[in-house]
């Protein structure tokens, strides 16, 4: 089993920055990819960014591109989402997610961390 625990959410003013962390544990060698999703009030879940397990390939949604950076620290077994130039529309619960080898979708989820951007 793989466990994901997010941290780093909070309240920030528009234009500010936050860094989310996702601590991973368990059978992480059996993962194909890691990523971030978010759920904004009244909206459906939205994919934000993802990376392959080896960290070589990274992709971003159009809303995250140029403002967010996904990365990982293998020594700490932690994935990060650096969010800059935050906008009120970035307000959401952010979830860390993982995709097992052979899976077609992300199927392991953290508990989520709230990000609120005030105008």
Image (tube, grey):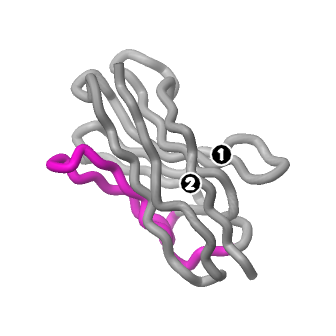
Element at label 1: strand
**Residue at (37%, 50%) from the top-left corner?**
58
Label disc, if present, on residue 46 of the rendered structure? 1
The residue to which callout 2 is attached is: 61
Which portion, as a residue range, is magenta? 65-87
* C-alpha distance separating marks 2 and 1: 9 Å
Task: Indicate whether 117 appears above or below 65.
Answer: below
Label 2 CA crowd tier, 10 Å (few <14, some 14–19, many 20+): few
Q: Quadrant of the N terminus?
A: top left
Judge from the rendering whether residue 37 lies leftward or rightward of residue 50; answer left or right: right
Instruction: Locate residue 85: give its quadrant.
Output: bottom right
Question: Among all residues in the image, which is located at the extreme right?
Answer: 42
Q: Position of residue 109 (x, y in %)?
A: 51, 32
Is-magenta flag for residue 70?
yes
The residue drawn where x is 29% and y is 48% is: 78
Vertically, is 102 above or below 76? above
Residue 94 percent coordinates (x, y): 58, 50
> Mark on residue 69?
none
Magenta stretch encompasses residue 95: no
> Which callout, 2 or 1, points at the residue further toward the start of the chain?
1
Q: Residue at x 62, y 62 (%)?
A: 115
Q: Which residue occupies 22% across, 26% down?
A: 29
Q: Quadrant of the C terminus?
A: bottom right
- Mark 2 or 1, which is nearer the eye? 1
Taking depth in this image into account, of 88 and 21 the one nearest to the observer is 21
Residue 73 relative to residue 17: left or right: left
Answer yes or no: do the residues labelled 2 and 1 have beta carbons within 8 Å? yes
């Amino acid at each position: 089993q793989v466990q994901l625990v997010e941290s780093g959410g909070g309240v920030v003013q528009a234009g500010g920055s936050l860094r989310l962390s996702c601590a991973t544990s368990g059978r992480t060698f059996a993962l194909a990819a890691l990523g971030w999703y978010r759920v904004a009030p009244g909206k459906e879940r939205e994919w934000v960014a993802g990376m392959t397990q080896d960290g070589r390939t990274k992709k971003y949604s159009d809303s995250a591109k140029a403002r967010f950076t996904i990365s990982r620290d293998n020594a700490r077994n932690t994935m990060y989402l650096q969010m800059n130039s935050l906008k009120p529309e970035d307000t959401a619960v952010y979830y860390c997610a993982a995709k097992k080898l052979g899976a077609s979708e992300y199927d392991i989820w953290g508990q989520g961390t709230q990000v609120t951007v005030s105008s």
